[in-house]
């Protein structure tokens, strides 16, 4: 995944350097922006940005505004950096198309693991397949989901979650297993993270929402 281009957007130069140096050691090409306006300029000028690490609180244009602007034209994965991760903030971010949250302070190693997990799913060979179950068709290479022939707009993390459910059709999955598999690293979160994503995914699946069943005391099961 050494060809991947990462855009880091944060007004703290010291934090940008820390993350940049770590990602460069991992083999990524890294671009930096100190505010939202600069971020949009770089994103527009530089082709094939693979992932954006985006801070919420910034001068001139905050992370929410940047995310909304980018989502008008692109589905590039976005990891949001935030000093707090309350439920309302998470819901707002998911509505705007944020794929994942990282709460400050954080470990650069953990952040790099999250970057790698996302890029393996979006750029790796595993993306070159199609899944179909219960009237839902998923084209992983094109990142497209259709329900009974009609396209459905999913964020990157919603797409990953649905993919994992479809690949494990009929299997009861614990929240811990979902976190470890979909996020693809040791994620120190709580059940709310999974429940929030499932709620958003169900709302977008419409009549197919019932295919994702709650298994009380365990987690969830996709059954088609």
Image: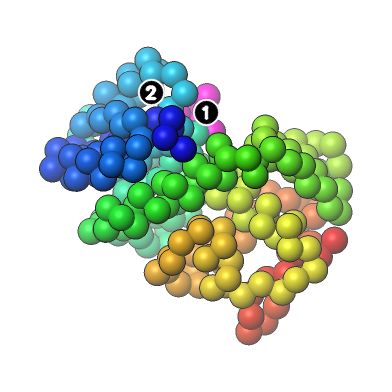
Magenta span: chief secondary structure: loop
Kindly state the secondary structure of the residue where label 2 is placed: helix
Q: Which mark is residue 143?
A: none
Q: How many marks?
A: 2
Q: Which residue is at the far bottom? A: 217
Residues in magenta?
Answer: 70-75
What residue is shown at x 13% (from left), y 43% (from top)? 14
What residue is shown at x 85% (from left), y 61% (from top)? 224
The percent coordinates of residue 178 (x first, y second) are 58, 66
Horizontal side of 98 relative to 167 (left or right) equals left
Q: In this picture, is 121 found above or below 29?
A: below
Q: Which mark is residue 43?
A: 2
Name the image quarter holding residue 122: top right
Badge 2: how crowded within 10 Å, few (<14), some, or many (20+)? Answer: some
Kindly state the secondary structure of the residue where label 1 is placed: loop
The percent coordinates of residue 103 (x first, y second) are 31, 58
Residue 96 in view (yes/no): no
Q: Which residue is at the far top? A: 45
Residue bearing mark 1: 74
Q: Is residue 143 magenta?
A: no
How far apart marks 1 and 2 lie (CA) works out to 10 Å
Most foreground residue, 126 or 131: 126
Residue 70 in view (yes/no): yes
What residue is shown at x 44% (from left), y 19% (from top)? 47
Horizontal side of 203 relative to 155 (left or right) equals right
Q: Is residue 73 magenta?
A: yes
The percent coordinates of residue 148 (x first, y second) are 86, 42
Image marks 1 and 2: residues in contact by CB distance under 8 Å: yes
């Amino acid at each position: 995944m050494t060809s991947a281009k990462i855009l880091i957007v944060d007004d703290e130069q010291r934090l940008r350097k820390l993350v940049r140096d770590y990602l460069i050691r991992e083999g990524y090409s890294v671009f930096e922006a100190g505010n939202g306006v600069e971020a949009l300029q770089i994103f527009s000028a530089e082709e094939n940005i693979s992932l954006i690490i985006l801070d919420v609180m910034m001068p001139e244009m905050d992370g929410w505004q940047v995310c909304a602007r980018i989502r008008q034209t692109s589905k590039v994965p976005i990891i949001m950096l935030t000093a707090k991760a309350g439920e309302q903030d998470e819901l707002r971010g998911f509505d705007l198309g944020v794929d994942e949250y990282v709460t400050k302070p954080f470990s650069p190693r953990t952040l790099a693991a999250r970057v790698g997990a996302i890029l393996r799913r979006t750029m790796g060979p595993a993306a070159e397949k199609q899944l179909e179950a219960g009237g839902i068709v998923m084209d992983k290479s094109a990142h497209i989901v259709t329900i009974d022939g009609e396209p459905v707009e999913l964020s990157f993390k919603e797409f990953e979650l649905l993919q994992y459910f479809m690949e494990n059709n009929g299997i009861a999955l614990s929240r811990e297993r979902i976190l470890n598999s979909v996020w693809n690293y040791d994620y120190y979160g709580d059940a709310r993270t999974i429940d929030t994503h499932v709620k958003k995914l169900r709302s977008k699946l419409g009549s197919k929402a019932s295919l994702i069943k709650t298994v009380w005391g365990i987690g969830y099961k996709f059954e088609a």
